[in-house]
Image (spheres, rainbow, N blue to C red):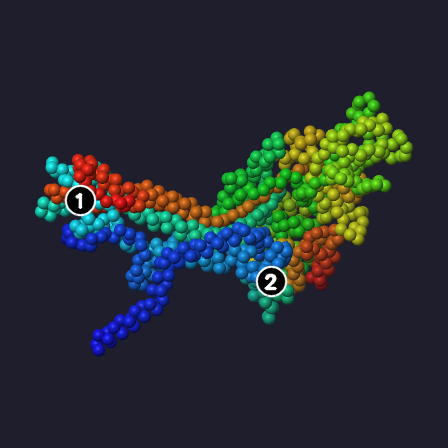
Amino acid sequence: MAEDMQASGPAEVDEAPQQRRVWRGPWRSVIFPLLVVSAIAAVIWWLEYRPDAETSVYDARFGPVAMPVEMVPPGMSVEAREGSLAPDYLLKTLDGGEIRFSDLRGKAVIVNLWATWCGPCRKEMPQFVAAYDRYREEGLEIIAVNVQESPSVIQPFVDDFGMDFPVALDKRGAVSDKYRILGLPMTYFIDRQGVIRDVFQGPFLERLQGTQVQGAIEQDELTQRIEEILE
Amino acid sequence: MAEQSALRSAGWLRTVRALDPFRATWRLFTNVRWAIGIISFMVLASLMGVLLPQVPSNVRGDGAAEAQWLASQGERFGFATDVMDRVGLFDIFHAVWFVYALGLLVVSITVCTASRLPPIWRAVSRPRKRVNDAYFASARYRFNYATPTAGSRLESGLRRQRYAVERYQEGETTYLFADRFQFAQLATFVSHLAIIIFLAAALVSRFSGFSNGLMIAEGTTGPVFPLTHSNQMQVELVDAVGRFSPEGQPLEYSSQLVIYQGGEEVKRCTTTVNSPCSYNGYRFHQAAYFGFGADVQVRDLASGNVIYRETMSLSDTLPSPHVIVRDGGGNVLLDEALVLTDILSTDEFVYYGRLVTLPDGRVLTMGARRGAESERWQLAVFEPGEGEEAVRLVLSEGEAASAAGLEFVYAGLQAIPAAFVSDLPLPPDVPAGDGARQVLVEMSNVVYGTGTASEGTAVVPATGDGPPELTIVGLQPRAQSLRPGESVQIGGYEYSFLGQREFAGIQVRKDRSDYLIWLGSALLIGGLLVTFWVPRRRLWAKITPARTYLAGQAGHLVRFDSELADIARREGAKLDEAEGQGEDD
């Protein structure tokens, strides 16, 4: 107040404080602006990257599980690639049950990753239905792993197409991630020892000629692969 | 000697200061010319981004498709195409240099704003309340007049005008400081902040925006993310509706959606073009509508299993001439928009056609051919046999003619949805042949634009000839026509037409930058309103028994000289004796 009371002072008032300021030292000229930028960036980060609200509760029991040690022969790796033991999973099935991949040891297993929205998956599914009818007595098991769809969407498809084999629900996409799928459909052929013998991406179709589905191969190729894992 | 040494030392210090990187950066980013330079560069780049062709979004990221698109630009830009591509001129708004320039602009504006905040805040919170007497003779706005003999009422007058007034007394002299709209001076920062937020929104959108287009048929689902994703959602299209005016102009598209996540239904909503459906930060926009889909199912009769179920998109069209045939007595024998199923030929030309059997048993071939000159579809009518009694007619649209005791009217031409389908399972006894076997699918009497069109029933069809009808050519020698719900068994398979279906294009977007845009817009408008409409006014007064001196400051948009004169007039000052100085003087 004492300063305010003094009549002496500059003849001019700072009429344009918005003019460019001079260097006021690192704190006021650098740190302070950085803090301002950081504050804005923090607000934007919160707006943009804040975690999405959890809308679906996943059952933590389902997903990848450790394979029992006694089922892993010495020197064998557990990976989703040819020549390795297929990774183990516990998944819920469409009919309300559960399926664990390692429980199928001793059978030849086809793991087919699919979805109803996937056109090539729809088109090849009759081939798996036919193959299952033909080879199930010889020890073939097919697990149709549906990728992140709702049972209410899957069930009509399964009924229409007569899929008698287990339909497992990969709700979180955990199987898809572990199997490193590049697209749908993707099919793994696993022999009776649990070893992945072949990996095939794309659909198996009844006739190669006349189809425009890229990557499709003839049904005979499916038969050949099944017979290899049944040996 | 000592002085010389001191001078050398000072020079050395100045050199070090000049080399200080912080200081140099500071000077750069607080330089208005620098900011204007960046803004000019951004404007120029944006202009080029508008004028030059840019890589389409559906091509970006697909190496082969990008190369093909780039090759198509080679015809236009020649040898410069490759250089332009390397520089990023074909994808300017995604180019690294553009993003860096945007970032520099953000930093520059931020630094400028931050550098000006302390002095302005000081001017707002701790204004200079006393000025030197000399200021009353040099201020931009000033006024002096004879102090009223009854005493000054300036202080109370200023308070009535909502000035915050402080009073200081020195002997017989009174000093006043009056301030109005004190915090309006900060509005300029609000406007600057808005610009920063706009630029930040652009960066947010550039780096984290998500957009994916889905084309879904009624009764089917589509995934939001192309494959798997921790936030994967499925979108089911329950019903797509396109409403049209009687002239065929689209009035509204809407879609009823169900959204699933983690295998559970999480949202059921209706989306329109202007009112997207939102869930968990994602927006589902109605982006397109297509009304001509046919839901077809094939069942293997031996197993009872469905082996094919698809909603075919009939995106091609084929001509369908509307023909009226009357006998000699004027009785109508045929009044129908013909679905053409075969490729026929005469000695002179090839045409799309079909056999038509009249009620009296006469068999004709009718079809459509392109006119040699007009390129319009003509009606061709032929009757097996030779001589005068056989029909041989080629009519243009709207024409009528008589031949062999019959009158033919080519009433009009429609285009009906059609498609060649390559993956429809053929009956087992149909040889596959060497080449691709395709079937032709045509849908007549199509209906769209109603909420129940997808059911294929209880709607008024476009032609008034009944519900939609699906004609399949290629399953057997004769074309097969099916109405919704009808089936036909051919060679061990059952083919069913389940109904007409509509498609909806759903654009799924997640871009929180739109919140920033709204915030920035509000701040910009608010800042500008305050800056222009209520700028700050500061007034200093020196009141002596003889004269009253006023000095003031205000924004450029304020005619403060007039306001000072008004203040003096309310005081009772005689303006003819007053002396004033305004900005215009």
Separation of residues labelled 2 and 1 (CA atoms): 90 Å
Asked which quadrant contains residue B539, the reply is: top left
Report whether residue A63 is seen: no
In the rendered image, which residue does mark 2 sit on? A80
Would you place residue B94 above or below residue B267 in this image?
A: below
Residue indicated by mark 1? B549
**Place of residue A59 in the rendered image (x, y in percent of width and height, measured from the top left):** 51, 52
Left-right relation of B122 to A39? left
Q: Which residue is drawn at 37% across and 50% down?
A: B193
Q: Is B571 or B517 nearer to us in this picture? A: B571
Q: Which residue is drawn at 56% across and 43% down?
A: B287
Q: Quadrant of the C terminus of chain A?
A: bottom right
- Residue B196 visible, this angle: yes
Regarding mark 1 in the picture, which secondary structure is present there?
A: strand
Q: Mark 1: give few (<14), some (14-19) or many (20+) Cα within 10 Å.
A: many
Three-letter code for the amino acid on which mark 2 is drawn: Ala
Tell me the residue at 64%/63% (across/down).
A196
